[in-house]
Amino acid sequence: MPRIKLYIATSLDGFIAREDGSIDWLTEYENNPETDYGYSKFYSSIGTVLMGRKTYEQVLGFGNWPYKEKKSYVFTRQKESLRRESNIEFVSGDIREFVH
């Protein structure tokens, strides 16, 4: 079985964003080598990114798609088309089955 590395971000209330959808509290950590805590090394070691649709839409709002060199899967139940970035595949089936 391949070794799986997992990176999850969440705040104490179980969410990253504030109730209004803002993630402004994260900007103090952007591109700061003092708060990297090994993330860059971890990120360079992975080949695939999994995320939900809301996270995908949030990341699109940052500007350039940061995962263009990684195969990315976006899990969604939304029927309407979403903006497609490079290396993206939308998945609407059962997440557990997909991962297995």
Image (cartoon, rainbow, N blue to C red):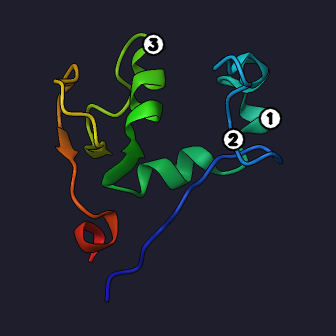
Q: Residue 2 location, x and y as percent?
A: 33, 82
Q: Position of residue 28 (x, y in %)?
A: 79, 20
Task: Give the distance between the C-alpha atoms of the residues marked 2 and 3, in whole angstroms.
Answer: 18 Å
> Residue 35: horizontal and vertical position, in percent?
77, 37
The x, y position of residue 99, in whole percent, is 29, 70
> Do residues under tags 2 and 1 come within 8 Å of each other at their CB atoms?
no
Q: Is residue 23 left or right of residue 11?
A: left
Residues tagged 3 and 1 counted as in contact (Cβ below 8 A): no
Secondary structure beneath label 3: loop
Q: Give the position of the C terminus as an image quadrant.
A: bottom left
Tell me where residue 27 sits by quadrant: top right
Please give the name of the residue rendered at 22% of the width and 23% of the height, measured from the top-left corner. Answer: 82
* Residue at x 54% of width, y 51% of height: 41
Distance from Cα at disc 3 to Cα at disc 1: 25 Å
Q: Residues within 10 Å of mark 3 (few under 14, many from 20)?
A: few
Task: From the image, state whether disc 3 or disc 1 is nearer to you.
Answer: 3
Residue furthest bottom in the image: 1
First along the sequence among labels 3 and 1 = 1
Judged from the image, the secondary structure of the residue bearing numbered disc 1 is: helix
Q: Nearer the viewer, mark 2 or mark 3?
A: 2
Which type of secondary structure does the marked residue at label 2 adopt?
loop
Q: How many labels sit on residues?
A: 3
Q: Is residue 10 left or right of residue 49?
A: right
Of tags 2 and 1, which is closer to the observer? 2
Distance, label 2 to label 1, CA atoms, is 24 Å
Q: Is residue 23 above or below residue 37?
A: above
Q: Earlier in the sequence, mark 2 or mark 1?
A: 2
Mark 1 — residue?
A: 34
Residue type at mark 1 is Glu
Q: Disc number at residue 61?
A: 3
Residue located beneath label 2 in the image: 15
Q: Amino acid at mark 2?
A: Phe
